[in-house]
Image: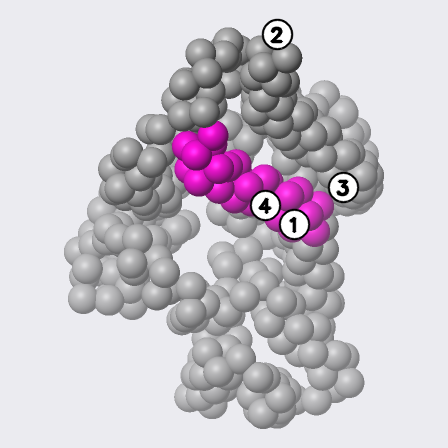
Amino acid sequence: MKFKYQARTKDGELQVGFITAASKEGAVNILTSHNLFILSLESAEVVHWYGNILNIFKKVNLTDLMIFTRQFATLLESKVPLNDSLKNLHKQTKNKILQEVIFEIASDIDSGLSLSKALERQNKVFSEFYISMIRSAEITGRLEEAVNYLADYLEKQRMWRSKTINALIYPAFLILGFVAVVILLVTIVLPNIKPVFEESNVYLPWYTRTIFGVGTFFVNWWWAIILIIIPAIFLIIDYFKTDEGKIVLDEILFRVPILGGMFKRMYVARFADSLSVLIKGGIPIAQAIEITAHSIGSYIYRDILHNVSESVRGGELLSNALNKSSDYFPSLVGQMVAIGEATGRLEELLFKVSSFYTREVEDLMNRLGELIQPIVIAFIGIFIGLLFASILIPIYNLIQGFKV
């Protein structure tokens, strides 16, 4: 198998490249044997669309992970020993895949591995951010606090995702219903009406002629449309799974009015929240920025934060490094970070930045949920009006011709 890695040498030099190994553990062993500190290690194997469909059924979803983390935090707060907590969670978990993962974690801990090492072996389920939080908590002795924070963090991510989906479900059903009605009209109803208009030599407006032309094209070439559109959809999905595709998708999202601003605020809130907790956990700031870069969920922000990390490692202030990317980090972030650096309260000021932008994102989501439905209904109403006008106006002209 081929893997893409990012690592640092003992001197702090960044290395990026590919390595071939029988498994991910084998790749880790090879890299560590060369005295490299691994930042990220991802499979570079090409996954086809059918592989992506199969993988959907092999994943632990965010809700299951959130419930596991919250229950784990509760057990640890109740002073239940680590291994007993995991065994209890293994019995309670309904997701079979997560249940197997918990069993393997408990077995690894029984064999002498630390919790962070056991989680690292399950990195398809637990993110680098999750593992790093546990690792830093093991060093500082604040495991309960870290797991509690992770539970809150996952609940917040789930809430944002749920609000976004709920805001889009109703408009999506409206659009699908409208598309279905249009297809029925242009492929079944209109072809039966068209000969009547042609025989009567009635005048047809341009929009009526356009709709008739679309209907004729669909009827004659439906098979070609299916053969082109379905492969094109899967090719586009495959492309957006690549690193380049993810960057392009981020760029598209950031350029969408209103939505772009909301996503930027969401990523800034994640950045500030994650970095605050990592610094509080005792992780060096440059390394904390790199970990945050991989957990933030945006490839554009990941690349920006890698540059910020390099600048901080070279001696530059974090506030100055962030101000260089003002399109993605508002000036308020740089100002608050500068105050934190000057007063020695960086993690506290980052938490305030996170709280501020979290509230902004929630307000935007609530407003979008209220606005998007009437906007979609209005657009669909306009198109339906145009569609019926394209039929009714020629019928009216035909009736007037008969009267004359």
Q: Amino acid at mark 1?
A: Ile
Which residue is nearer to you in this view: 247 or 104?
A: 247
Q: Label 1, label 4: how many angstroms apart (C-alpha)?
A: 12 Å
- According to the picture, the residue beneath numbered tag 3 turns out to be 369
Q: Label 2, label 4: how many angstroms apart (C-alpha)?
A: 40 Å
If you read the primary sequence from the N terminus, does the residue marked by circle 3 or circle 4 appear first? 4
Question: Which quadrant does the C terminus fall into?
Answer: top right
Mark 1 crowdedness (10 Å alpha carbons): few <14, some 14-19, many ≥20:
few
Q: Residue at position x 42%, y 69% from top?
A: 57
- According to the picture, the residue beneath numbered tag 4 turns out to be 177
- According to the picture, the residue beneath numbered tag 2 turns out to be 404
* Region rendered in magenta: 164-193
Which residue is nearer to you in this view: 2 or 179?
A: 179
Q: Is residue 357 visible?
A: no
Q: Quadrant of residue 243?
A: top left
Give the percent coordinates (x, y) of residue 9: 33, 45
If you read the primary sequence from the N terminus, does the residue marked by circle 3 or circle 2 appear first? 3
Is residue 89 covered in magenta?
no
Q: Are marks 3 and 2 in contact (CB under 8 Å)?
A: no
Q: Amino acid at mark 4?
A: Gly
If you read the primary sequence from the N terminus, does the residue marked by circle 2 or circle 4 appear first? 4
Q: Nearer the viewer, mark 2 or mark 1?
A: 2
- According to the picture, the residue beneath numbered tag 1 turns out to be 169
Q: Amino acid at mark 3?
A: Gly
User: Which element carries disc 4, helix, strand or loop?
Assistant: helix
User: Which element carries disc 3, helix, strand or loop?
Assistant: helix
Q: Are marks 3 and 4 in contact (CB under 8 Å)?
A: no
Give the percent coordinates (x, y) of residue 353: 77, 37
If you read the primary sequence from the N terminus, does the residue marked by circle 3 or circle 1 appear first? 1
Give the percent coordinates (x, y) of residue 338: 74, 27
Question: Which quadrant does the N terminus fall into?
Answer: bottom left
Q: Residue at position x 58%, y 21% from top?
A: 395
